[in-house]
Image (cartoon, rainbow, N blue to C red):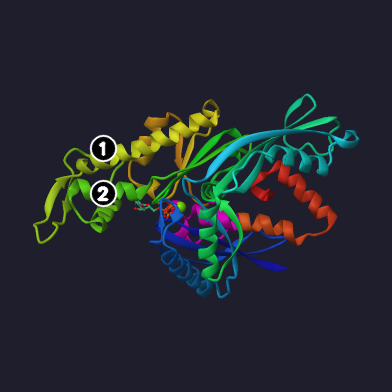
Amino acid sequence: MKGLRVGLDVGTSKVCALVAEASRESEPTVIGYGVAPCTGLRKGVVVNIDAAVEAIRAAVGEAEKSAGIKITSAVVGIAGSHIEGLNSHGIVAVRGGEVGVRDVQRVIEAARAIAIPLDRQIIHILPQRFTVDDQADVRDPIGMAGVRIEAHIHVVTAAQTYAQNLIKCSERAGVSVQQLVLEPLSAATAALLADEQELGVALVDIGGGATGVVVMLRGAVMHTAVLPIGGNHLTADLAAGLRTPTAEAERLKIAYGVATNHVVKSDEVVQVPGVGGREPRAIPRRLLGEILGPRMEEIFALVQRHLIRSGVTDSLASGLVLVGGSSLLQGTQELAERVFNVPIRHGLPVNLKGMPEELMKPMYATAAGLVLHSNAENAGANGADRRRRWEKMRSRVSGWVRDFF
Ligand SMILES: Nc1ncnc2c1ncn2[C@@H]1O[C@H](COP(=O)(O)OP(=O)(O)OP(=O)(O)O)[C@@H](O)[C@H]1O
Ligand SMILES: [Mg+2]
């Protein structure tokens, strides 16, 4: 039986609806998409419901047309600096001397029993590792002999009002929300390789209004954060610095902007159109670097703070993977290499099959990951029989990307 997997990325710059078809036997393959500009968000959260609904409707309508299907539900991405990620752990006694599915469920319950304020809701519970008696760093404890099991987990929570506004927008546009997924986590699912997740890696999604960070080690999520700063700040700095309209600053940024002047030849010149009837003027391209560089450095300094907070900076053997539209700013990789002093690469949504070429860009990693999360969710829901449930539980424990959510 074939089914639809829909990802809906409601971003500060654009909404992207991505539709894939999947069956029990086959991986999801993209069959259509729609992208629409969005003005209803600021810094990753909805601030204007009508504008957000309109953009979702436009993107979903386009996706329906291109795929020739009707979209009724989707996995939707959530971001914003209200997102909090924290690590927790819990211990329970093992019943009957051998760890069973129930024991794993109970110990995760114990670990998640942390005080969460009433105005916040849990978005994800991500197991990191288990300890059975004295044996630490166990990924799949089911079937192991022992009397005591401990679970370490990462919990992601969101402010309820922001989450509810996002759900409201989606529903008003005719799309029910199957599940909310943290946007950078979704981008990580689409762009990170299995080896990187094992060896230690940080995914950094630099979007229009926000920058998301996810740190992974030994296949588990160790740290998550969303910073309220992104490409719109770069554009605003340029508009102010060059005294030019925002639309023009955006165009200049994309065409000639640089994150560091290391990538600019000393004599390069760019034309800036005049405002209010003034003559166009020629400016050295290095001026763009002088304006944009410090802001990008500020973004990286905030990211660095989160990497340190994750407590695993010494273990990031695979370095940083950059996604999001603003990672395309020329010189971003060079600047990141200098700031972080670890290997840096650009990420693309490589883990989803059938991505059209025009979507093989860093700003579509989130939408692609949402489709993969939708697939994981559906794979679990279809097989109601005991054996499949058991398998799902096992893979939940051993592979967060495939099945936990
Ligand atoms: N070639 C480029 N060079 C520099 N910046 C770019 C380039 N292409 C796109 N951008 C910037 O990328 C940003 C949009 O990125 P993206 O589509 O990832 O954001 P979003 O997902 O809509 O927003 P967010 O995730 O912050 O809510 C804009 O600020 C845009 O100016
Ligand atoms: Mg985004």
Q: Taking the image as drawn, is residue 14 in sight?
A: yes
Magenta-drawn stretch contains 375: no
Q: Nearer the viewer, residue 35 or 237?
A: 237
Q: CA distance from mark 1 to mark 2?
A: 11 Å
Tell me the residue at 49%/32% (across/down).
307
The residue indicated by pointer 1 is 261
SS category of the residue bearing label 2: helix
SS category of the residue bearing label 1: helix
Check the image and report above or below for 247 versus 293. below
Check the image and report above or below for 75 versus 227. below
Q: Residues within 10 Å of mark 1 (few under 14, many from 20)?
A: many
Is 78 left, or right, of 326 in this rendering? right
Q: Nearer the viewer, residue 148 or 339?
A: 148
Q: Taking the image as drawn, is residue 8 in sight?
A: no
Q: Nearer the viewer, residue 147 or 262?
A: 147
Identify the amino acid type marked 2. Tyr
Check the image and report above or below for 214 versus 167. above
Query: Where does residue 320 sit, x and y in percent of width and height?
Result: 48, 37
Query: Where does residue 310 sit, x and y in percent of width and height?
Result: 54, 32
Magenta residues (range): 350-372
Tell me the residue at 17%/53% (across/down).
272
Q: Earlier in the sequence, mark 1 or mark 2?
A: 2
Tell me how many marks there are.
2
The residue indicated by pointer 2 is 256
Magenta-drawn stretch contains 365: yes
Q: Residues within 10 Å of mark 2 (few under 14, many from 20)?
A: some
Task: Classify mark 1 as within 8 Å of ligand 1 or not, answering yes or no.
Answer: no
